[in-house]
Image (spheres, grey):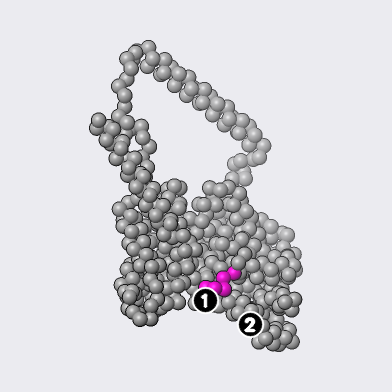
Amino acid sequence: MVDHHHQRLVEKARTGEHSAFRELMECHQQKIYYLAFDLTGNHHDAEDLSQETFIRVFRTLKNFRGEASLSSWLYRIMVNLYIDRQRKKSTTFLEFHEDVESKQNPDIRISSTHDPAHDTEIHLLQKHIEQALQRLSARQRSVFTLRHYHHMGIREIADTLEIAEGTVKSLLFRAIQILQKELAFYRADPDEEYEP
Amino acid sequence: MKSCQKYQKEFVSALYGELPSEQRSRFEAHLKTCVECAAAFAHMKSTLELMDQRIRPEPEAAYWNTCWERLRKRLEEETSDVHVSPTEAEPLRNSLRIHRRLIYQIASAAAILLIGMYIGQHMGKTPPEQPLSEHVVEIPYHSPSIRHYLERSETILLGLVNFESDPVTPDAIDLYHLKHVSRQLVQEAEPLRVQLTQPEQQLLRELISDLEVILLQISNLEAKQDVLGIDLVKSSVNRKAILLRINLEEIQQLDAETTSLSNSVKTNL
């Protein structure tokens, strides 16, 4: 039923009906924003990436054939935009450094537990997790985010991103290895550190 | 070994519960017999559990209500841009921009030349030598708070690194005090790092980040003699060459101070 409704909205939006496009956007805006946040790690970039995704959708809606679900199509557009942005960013050394600095994730606000030591620990953990995620390549982070935080199956990710299932598995495996290495100091036994 | 490789390829699917039941049974049976695979799998699992603790902050409530308005504006802007700047106009505009830049450059060069000639003709006397200190590029100093931070961190780390676990005198180290100071230093790290915005301060910024992690490890040590935890801290300090890096920062600082002092002496002479 929902799919039929979406299909009708897509048809209307194709003809330039703004209200239909608005409804489509509002149906998906939360999922899209959350994915953008998980990929970029901060609100500013997440908002920008979400908007760019919807603009791209608006322009290319006529190409949407309805074979995949609309949300898969949105995810694919967003991940491709994100990978493309990261590729452009890493082409210049200066921008790379700027990127690392800006990814300190100032947006994370932890509700206080009235225990400063505990709050500090939580805050640091969040920061270290974000720093570890930043160590992943754009492709690794995309696949890891879709699997771990958006609970998409390996097959589904492969279909959405139009890559082989084996590629998804190896990107995931490598991503977890990198995260493991980056967060090794949280482990009780440091001897089992992964060697690249 | 070969079978291990085969099962390691299944780690990801197993971690996310995506192995078919029959394969899952074989996988679990292998883990029961292979200590290495079991350890590696447990390690990966614990990493994912740690990643589960990530918190995704919610945007302000107003954000969702205003999404469409912002998107609509952006769409309108992009549409109007298309009308305003047709691609045909771009080459012409670029060439005008280049010409204008060239004219400015020639004009600036001519102005500098004329000023130089005027100074040469009308101010024949050799100008008095400028004080040396004005020629010297000042080497940036660390703020006193950063210096103090590094000194205190170094003291804490030296205390731990030089600690030898001795069952006869288990209270040889005042762990309570070290933990307390480390916790304070962890809290001071972020505001200090914010001050370090210059590119030449990149190494110092990284040093403070690494120190923060190690100090957190210290503040999380068990209240009693946590020999294993102390060893972990020691290995982190060695691996990241923390004490050496602190010493290098101190040498640079000393160098900057010596240069500045000698310059001021020369100026006074």
**Span colored in magenta:** A190-194
Q: Is residue B103 above or below residue A65?
A: above
- Give B125 or B117, whichever is nearer the viewer: B125
- The amino acid type found where label 2 is placed reads Val
Neighbourhood count class around disc 1 (C-alpha, 10 Å): few under 14, some 14–19, many 20 upward: few
Residue A58 visible, this orientation: no
The quadrant in which the C terminus of chain B is found is top left
Q: Is residue A193 magenta?
A: yes
Task: Give the structural element (helix, strand or loop) at label 1.
Answer: loop
Instruction: Give me the C-alpha separation between circle 1 and circle 2.
Output: 15 Å
- Percent coordinates x, y for residue B234 in the rendering: 44, 68
- Percent coordinates x, y for residue B189 in the rendering: 38, 61
Residue beneath the point at 52% across and 54% down: A99
- Percent coordinates x, y for residue A74 in the rendering: 65, 65
Residue beneath the point at 54% across and 73% down: A191
The residue that disc 2 covers is: B35
Find residue A21 and name its label.
none
Residues at marks 1 and 2, common chain?
no
The residue that disc 1 covers is: A189
Neighbourhood count class around disc 2 (C-alpha, 10 Å): few under 14, some 14–19, many 20 upward: few
- The amino acid type found where label 1 is placed reads Asp
- Give A115 or B3, whichever is nearer the viewer: B3
Q: Chain of mark 1?
A: A
Q: Is residue A121 above or below residue B108?
A: below
Q: Is residue A93 left or right of residue B128?
A: right
Q: Where on the picture, by quarter, is residue A86? A: bottom right
Q: Is residue B194 above or below residue B124?
A: below
Q: Is residue A22 magenta?
A: no
Residue beneath the point at 73% across and 70% down: A165
Residue found at the very far front of the displayed protein: B168
